[in-house]
Image (cartoon, grey):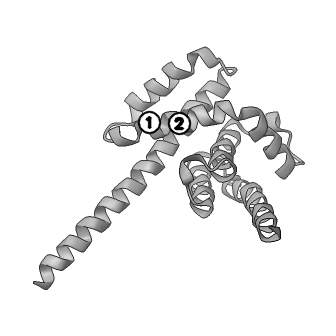
Amino acid sequence: MTSIVVLVVLTTKTKRNKNMSNRHLARSIAMQALFEWDFRGRPTAALPAIVEHNLQEFGVGIETEKDFVKKLVDGVIENLDSIDVLIQKYAPNWPVDQITVVDRNILRIGILELKFKHDNVPPKVAINEAIELAKSFGGPASGKFVNGVLGAMFKEMEEAEEKK
C-alpha cells in the first residue's frame, strides 16, 4: 500500500518537474528567437518565421508550451518600448543598445513576466528563470547583472505594493 502512494507522489512530482523544465526550455527558445530577431536588426516581419524555426529546431517534445513561447515573444514585442524604458531605469549606467544582445533579451523576457504579469508567473520565478537563462547563455557576469536589474525592479514593486 505504501509503495503505491509513493509511486503516485513520484509520478505527480515528475510531471510537475517536467512542466517546469518545459517552461524553462520554452523561455530559452523565446530568448533565442528574440536574440536572432534583435541581432538581425529587428525585422518584425521575419519574427514569426524565426520563432517557428527555433521551435522546430529546439522545441521537440514541448508541444504544450509552443503557445507560451509565442506569447512571450509577442508580449515582448508589444511592450518593447515600455520594457526598454524600464531596463534603462534600472540599469542607468548601461544604455539599452550597449547591453549584450543576450542579456538585453533575457531582461526583456524577465521584465515582461515580472512587471506585465505575463501568464501570472510568480515574481520570484520570473527573476530566477531570467537569472538561469543569463547563466546559461550570457557571459560570466550576466547572472549577477540580470539579478541586479530585476531585483531592483522587484524591490521597488514590493515597496509600492506596501504603500497601498
Name the element at disc 2.
helix
Residue 143 image position (x, y, % from top left): 66, 56
- Left of 17 or right of it: where is 101? right
How would you rate the neighbour count of disc 1 (Cα within 10 Å): few for under 14, some for 14-19, many for 20 or more? Answer: few
Q: Alpha-carbon distance for marks 2 and 1?
A: 6 Å
120 or 104, nearer to the observer = 120
Is there CB contact under 8 Å for labels 2 and 1?
Answer: yes
Name the element at disc 1.
helix
Disc 2: which residue: 71
- Left of 55 or right of it: where is 125? right
Residue at position x 77%, y 38% in the image: 82
In which quadrant is the N terminus drawn? bottom left
Residue at position x 63%, y 58% in the image: 127
Instruction: Give the answer, above or below, for where 142 lies relative to 33.
Output: below
149 or 4, nearer to the observer = 4
23 or 39, nearer to the observer = 23
Residue 79 image position (x, y, % from top left): 70, 35
How would you rate the neighbour count of disc 2 (Cα within 10 Å): few for under 14, some for 14-19, many for 20 or more? Answer: some
Say which quarter of the image contains residue 94: top right
Spot the residue most to the right. Answer: 93
In which quadrant is the C terminus drawn? bottom right
Residue at position x 50%, y 33% in the image: 70
Amino acid type assigned to the residue bearing label 1 in the image:
Asp
Disc 1: which residue: 67
Residue 100 image position (x, y, % from top left): 73, 39
Instruction: Give the answer, above or below, for where 87 lies relative to 18.
Output: above
Amino acid type assigned to the residue bearing label 2 in the image:
Lys
Instruction: Give the answer, above or below, for where 132 lies relative to 47.
Output: below
158 or 38, nearer to the observer = 158
